[in-house]
């Protein structure tokens, strides 16, 4: 649930059946653009993860996926 006053997730949103899991790989090293070399989330996305709604987390995961694909254009079958 998003609080309409500040756009942040309410505490009830933190526990949900459709909640995406954290993509953290415990590498936790940021590049010069503040993007994690492990999970490809931005530093801001990493810090916002805990309070983000399930929808916001899915959006973060999609942005991280796009960053990973742009950084690693080779696809293995």
Image (cartoon, rainbow, N blue to C red):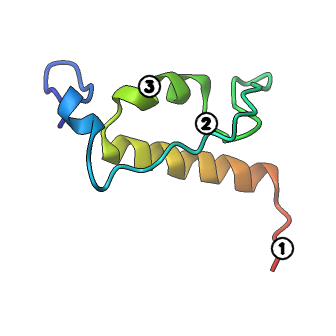
Residue 3 position in % (x across, y down): 16, 26
Query: Is residue 56 shown left or right of residue 8?
Result: right
Could you tell me which residue is drawn at 29 percent across and 35 percent down?
Answer: 14
Q: Is residue 57 above or below residue 43?
A: below
Q: Is label 1 in contact with label 3 (beta carbons under 8 Å)?
A: no
Q: Which of marks 3 and 2 is nearer the N terminus?
A: 2
Q: Is label 2 in contact with label 1 (beta carbons under 8 Å)?
A: no
Residue 10 in sight in this render: no
Q: Is residue 6 above or below residue 55?
A: above
Quarter the N terminus occupies:
top left
Q: How far apart are marks 2 and 1 (CA)?
A: 22 Å
Q: How far apart are marks 1 and 3 (CA)?
A: 32 Å
Could you tell me which residue is drawn at 32 percent across and 47 percent down?
Answer: 55
| Residue 12 tag number | none
| Residue 41 tag number | 2
Check disc 3 and report the residue beneath it: 48
Check disc 1 and report the residue beneath it: 76
Q: How far apart are marks 3 and 2 (CA)?
A: 10 Å
Which residue occupies the foreground of this view, 55 or 20?
20
């Amino acid at each position: 649930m998003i609080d309409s006053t500040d756009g942040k997730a309410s505490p009830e949103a933190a526990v949900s059946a459709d909640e995406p899991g954290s993509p953290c790989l415990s590498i936790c090293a940021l590049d010069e653009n503040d993007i994690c070399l492990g999970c490809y989330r931005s530093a801001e996305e990493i810090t916002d993860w805990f309070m983000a709604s399930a929808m916001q987390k899915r959006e973060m995961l999609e942005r991280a996926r796009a960053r990973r694909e742009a950084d690693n254009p080779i696809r293995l079958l």
